[in-house]
Image (cartoon, rainbow, N blue to C red):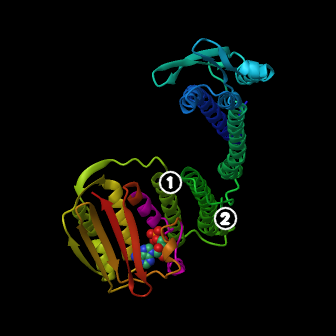
Amino acid sequence: MKTSLKVKLWMAFIGIALFLYLTISVLANVVLDAQFKQYTINKLDQKIKDTVALVSESYQRFGGWDAASLENIGVNALKEGLMIRVTDDSGAVLWDAREHNNGLCMAILKNMAENMQSYNTRFKGGYEEKEFAVDAGGDAAGRVAVGYYGPYFYSDLDIQFLGTLNSLLLWAALGSVAVCLVFGAYMARRLTSPIARVVKTAGRIAKGDFNDRIDEESSTKEIAELTDSINTLAQTLDSQEALRKRLTADVAHELRTPLATLQSHVEAFIDGVWEPDEARLKGFHEEILRLSKLVGELEQLSRYEGESLVLNVETFDLAELVRGVAANFEGEFGKKGIEVSLDTQEQYIEADRDKISQVFINLISNALKYTGEGGRVEIRVSGTPHDAKAEIRDTGVGISAEDLPYIFERFYRTDKSRNRATGGAGIGLTIVKSIVEAHKGSVTVESEPGKGSAFFVTLPK
Ligand code: ADP
């Protein structure tokens, strides 16, 4: 059976509270008990000494035994739980607490015994007596015997103090358990509610609903990261899904027009409406070539976009590669009367030569396609210690600000280029981006409609 995080947190909090209570109360009892016992013994010793000193003092003050003074001392001592018996030099009893009030003495001893039993049932104690000589400044004056409940005893006040302390500890424990319950519940709620939300959203994602997002902000780092990841996942899946749907629709759309044309023309041949002459067959051929090119580009795209994009890395000079690609287009640039300028510095990079070559074929062929007669194309290769940079700048039709963010997406073509029937399917730049990103590089564009465009490729060395 799986226990929820809430319950586990709760149990942990209560466990800690109980553990602390037990440790503190055991330690408090053991340490306090020893200390209090020592303190009581010292106090008792002091009381006994004080009483004996009072008797000696009385003897010295009166220059002999004074019955009233002895009684006064004896009664006071009795209040403190001490039973004294004073005898003179010859051993005759001058004052004895038991003779004075035997009932009270017995009651005191019984009360002490009860107190000690109530505090500790294993306490062993009983009547004890200590005898002292009365100090009469050198003369032998007599003796004082002090009796008490020994080895030590707790008075009613002491017992009350210990009881209060223990109940305070108990209340503290109950209080901390209560605080732990409340705080634990609060913490558990704070921790588990975003997790529950993540679980719910993840469940929805699993069912194909990618629109749900987690808005709750968590101050817990890991939970914030978790919700961020789930949101990013949903976002990625959402755009992938949209892209997939659009791709299918786009492919269908791209194929439909040429197929419909071919179909109607072939039907016209069959019905004898048209003669299959050379010009018409040439038109067919061109259409079929266009279709094959499209299928080829789609194939290429799936290869570059798929996870299986394997890079055959080698070291080569980017400048040399770019010059080579540009040279292949020389004839076509010449035909359109476009002036091409090259400004390249040697930049050795580690990359997949064929794929990088494809990047520049696409970019330079776009510059050729979208630049009118008499335009200019500038190609530059430069670099920094870490990156190689290439720039393809043309004075062509340019791209409007609305189109600019989308030109790297599959099948995206600006209306201008659709109307111009330049023949592209809107895949070239998608391939460029896939290849450059697979090399951990970046490609960006700047453009102004009517003035021209510039594409910047950065590749790490
Ligand atoms: P296509 O095969 O249609 O050229 P691309 O993916 O290469 O597809 O480019 C996408 C769109 O970006 C093009 O249809 C065009 O509208 C625009 N584009 C790309 N390069 C340029 C450029 N150098 N000048 C103007 N527009 C461009």
Mark 2 residue type: Ile
Q: Is residue 190 above or below residue 429?
A: above
- Count of numbered badges drawn on the protein: 2
In front here: 339 or 434? 434
Tell me where the magenta segment starts and ends, as one range: 411-435
- Name which residue lies at 60% across and 34% down: 24
127 relative to 295 in the view: left or right:
right
Check contact, mark 1 vs mark 2: CB within 8 A: no
Q: Mark 2 points at which residue?
A: 270
Q: Which mark is residue 391?
A: none
- Name which residue lies at 68% across and 60% down: 211
Q: What element carries label 2?
A: helix
In front here: 90 or 147? 90
Q: Name the residue under label 1.
A: 302
Residue 364 visible to an observer of this rendering? no
Mark 1 residue type: Ser
**Which label sits in the foreground, 1 or 2?**
1
Res 459 → quadrant: bottom left
Res 345 → quadrant: bottom left
In front here: 191 or 198? 191
Which percent across, then down, holds residue 361? 35, 65
